[in-house]
Image (spheres, grey):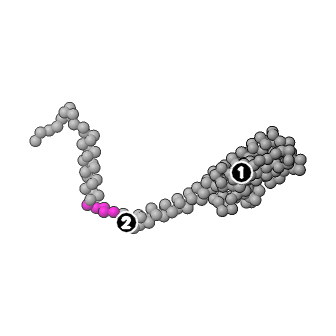
Amino acid sequence: MRTIHQDEGVDWLALAMFLKLERVIKMLDSKYKGFTLIELMIVVAVIGILAAIAYPSYQDYLMRSRRADAKAGLLSLQLAQEKYRASCVQYATTINSASANYSCATGNYTLTHATTSPDQHYNLSVVTSTATGTTYTLRATRNSTGLQSNDKCGDFQITQPGIKSIINAASGYTGANCW
């Protein structure tokens, strides 16, 4: 029998790992053939607990992310109101998604703008405009059949001076933590 010396270029680490792996495979083949029912039940229970904790947090995260849709729609509508006011003597009193032929001189103060938010989770409207047309309040109302219908922040509003608020919100929710 020939002996192998260390200087002959043998990868000793690879040889040691191979021998250990061979022992592990033999041990698994002879002793263990699968998982027990208890082990599987423990895994199912752990997954169930994690899902019970994670799912409500995920739903809350989705609600919060969709609120950006209302904010984007309101800010776009506010910008359109300011552009409208630059051409007319007052702010628009209504909005219409179709191309409106308005004339400031005839008193048809309809703004051409989408009536829904960009992702259509909210309906946009001009809820108040003074008789002189110097101020306005814009509202993003949750779509009653949409994904945001149960959002606890309610509906969003912004006024001509830029005051942001919410209405129809659940108890404990304020404009500060929803906007």
The amino acid type, in three-letter code, at marker 2 is Thr
Q: Earlier in the sequence, mark 2 or mark 1?
A: 2
Circle 1 sits in a helix, a strand or a loop, which is it? loop
How far apart, in angstroms, are the residues tagged by discs 2 and 1?
66 Å
* Residue found at the far bottom of this picture: 37
Residue 26 in picture, x, y percent from top left: 25, 56
The one nearer the camera, 74 or 30, is: 74
Reading the image, the residue beneath label 2 is 36
The amino acid type, in three-letter code, at marker 1 is Ala
Q: Is residue 172 among what the camera can see?
A: no
Q: Identify the residue at horizontal 61%, vertical 54% (top origin).
A: 62
The one nearer the camera, 29 or 114, is: 114
Residue 157 in picture, x, y percent from top left: 76, 51
Asked whether residue 32 is drawn in magenta, I would say yes
Q: Identify the residue at horizontal 41%, vertical 66% (top origin).
A: 38
Reading the image, the residue beneath label 1 is 98
The one nearer the camera, 128 or 45, is: 128
Q: Is residue 29 among what the camera can see?
A: yes
Instruction: Locate the N terminus and report the quarter of the image it occupies.
Output: top left
Q: Identify the residue at horizontal 77%, vertical 47% (top origin).
A: 101
Q: Quadrant of residue 10?
A: top left
User: Counting other residues with Cα less than 10 Å from the Cα at mark 1, is it few (<14), some (14-19), or many (20 or more)?
Assistant: few
User: Counting other residues with Cα less than 10 Å from the Cα at mark 2, is it few (<14), some (14-19), or many (20 or more)?
Assistant: few
Write the start and end of the magenta stretch as one range: 30-34
Residue 40 in picture, x, y percent from top left: 41, 64
